[in-house]
Amino acid sequence: MSSNGAAGKGRLATIRRLMDYAPNGYFRCVRGEVSLRHAARSGQIEINRWLLDSGVDPYCTQTRSDDFKSLAYINRVAPVLIAARRGHTEAAKVLLDSMTDFDYVTPLYIAAEKGVEAVVELLLQRGARMDMIGYARETSLHAAISANSIKAVSLLIEHGANVNAIDSSQETALKRSLSDRTGPGILKLLLDAGADFTVPNKHGITPVKWVFNKRAKEKVRLLLNAIESRGVSSDLPESPTTLLRAAIVAQHDLAYRLLAQGADVNQRERDEGWTQLMEAAQQEQDGLFDLVLQKSLDVNSADGRGRTALSFAAEHGSEHKVRALLKRNASDRARFWYLTPLTYAAENHHLQVVLLLLRQKKGVDLADDSLRSAVTSAVAFGDVQFLELIQEKGKLDQPDWRYGDTVLHHAASRGDLAVVKWLLNQSVGVDTAGCDERAPLMLAACSRNDAVVEQLLQHGARIDARDVDRATALHWALPRWIDPSLEISNCDSTLGVDLKRGLPGNSIIVKMLVEVDADLEAKNAMDETPLTCAVINGSESAVRLLLEKGVNSESCDKSGSVPLLFAAWKGHTAVVSLLLEYGARIDSTNADGNTALMLAADNGHHETILSLLARPAEINRVNHAHRAALSCAAEKGHDKAVEILLRYGAEVDLPDHTGRTPLLCAAQNKHERCVELLVQGSADVTRGDIEGRTPLWWASRRDQRSSRKSHDAAIRILYDRHPAARS
């Protein structure tokens, strides 16, 4: 081991042994300086002390770089900076004890940058200068603020740090404290120390405007407090409009004083078109809002996005502000993006504001954009009172403009029984086709809302309706996917097995649809029957229900697969057994000639394999590529499946059309355990493929899929059985 490595790992004994063989002055050169840096980097106190006692220069003047812009600087600074950066307080202390002057380096900056408060305190106690600059002319105070270290900032200020220092990008320490990553406590420390809050950055943005744009109310409040305490509100570079808006955002008393002094509330913000009324409409205090409203000439002014004061008041659910604006004839029409005050109120579930706005309307059409989102939100929260008011004003079965779904579609999908019942009692169209021709019954079935399905069926919903993919409600009750966000309602014990396995609780709905004579052999656009969907889904109870009704268990989809193949592919062992019990052919194949056993082996479903072999399945049958189940399992590395197939008598050296045996498949794909099992099963280790590549040839080729240990183990297993090893 080198002295550098020993220093970094704290092996003082090793260093001393090296010294027994080293020439005089070994450490009083470049080697010693490098070792000292390694020790400082890992905080090795004793090694630091020993190296310094041996005469190593603590400044590392032979190898030091003071060029902050140089890439070499990171690895060639004085060791005390390295210790400071890593937060090794004791190691830094040992180094400082040997240094009489360290102002030409910036350990204080490094410690402040990392927020290592103990090191900052230590350096300040040792007299470190705070006016030394680091990267981009930043001071240690800049660095401590960036680290969000309130204690480090406090220590630096107590020791006289310049709170108005400016870096190369014209950023003051106070401006740095306005970052989202920095807490308001640091800003307060700077303001209490007299930091100048009038200095703009290089873009001309002052601290007040910057923090106001960030909507950081606490920091705005701190700045306004400082403005008031210093009595400089009339001398600020900010316009009165900006200052008033900031005071309104912070709900600060300064806003009342500015209004009393005649501040203009009608001047619009130049860039975004904001008015003071829009800002006041978003805040909690009604009194401040009322003052601004009294002075506002145009209550319908809109910002660049078309938002008005009424829009903001409705979004925040303030009945007082909405009522006051309506008395001033505020418009509730959409200006942009089709979003009205009513929309914002409904989306945020402010029911009383919604009702207040609705009562202002003489009539509404649900096809209008003004109520599209509002109705959807009301349905989501089950606001029947809101819907009853809409019924007085317009049409409930009008589809929305974007997707074509009606209110009933949304309610059925959400499973909101109360809203569904109310809508059906209003004679809303129960079979109206929505997005992709979907009927409400399909959405309710997919969402597993059996109570809603029952209501729709009682009101005459068509069970033979088809969507754009030719799927019926029964298909939708047995989706190919599982959405864990869907809630299971009104479940009974018959669903216990499915629920424990994490499968949809859809058997009740399937039973409902079956009892009203749903077409059990209906095929969707992929020629999948409800049974196929249930099998893919893994719903054992639904599969049993359909099989008991006599559905065709050998129905093929467009890929040529029957339900048994899907069940084996997915590893639904109970469903496989059920299908075989009801007469499914165990030797059925898909378009590639794969049997259920091959698909189960290919996916490593060993329980399914055992179930199929118990029938028994033909274990050495090959597909169109002349591959048997053993090759499928070996290629994918499913060692448990390989073990089972060998135990049941699978032919160990059966080649595919390229001459690859199961052993070749396993060796090529670096599956060490499968190689071991096949060799133990007397596989021929010398047999190659049609190009003469043997298992040993494949195993010797390393790639990123295998570790060195696994790679060597596979070679050893093959070589031990190779004839060459015995000769």
Image (cartoon, rainbow, N blue to C red):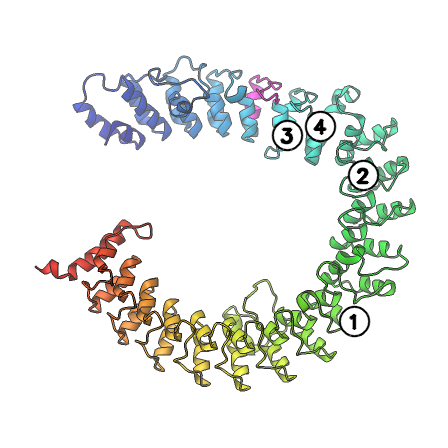
Q: Position of residue 571 (x, y in %)?
A: 43, 71
Q: Amino acid at mark 3?
A: Leu
Side of 286 where 205 appears, left or right? left
The residue identified by callout 4 is 208
Which quadrant is the N terminus positioned in?
top left
The residue identified by callout 3 is 178
- Residue 96 against residue 410 in the figure, above or below: above
Q: Please, what is the dominant secondary structure of the magenta stretch? A: loop
Disc nearer the start of the sequence (1/2): 2
- Residue 475 against residue 23 in the figure, above or below: below
* x 12%, y 58%: residue: 725
Judging from the image, what secondary structure is the residue with disc 1 in?
loop
Nearer-the-camera pick, 653 or 226: 653
The residue identified by callout 1 is 428
- Residue 425 against residue 47 in the figure, above or below: below
Q: Which mark is residue 280?
A: 2
Judging from the image, what secondary structure is the residue with disc 4 in?
helix
Q: Which residues are magenta?
A: 153-172
Whether 663 is among the magenta residues is: no
* x 61%, y 66%: residue: 487
Disc nearer the start of the sequence (1/4): 4
Residue 139 visible in this rendered orientation of the protein = no
Side of 157 where 378 appears, left or right? right
Q: Amino acid at mark 2?
A: Ala
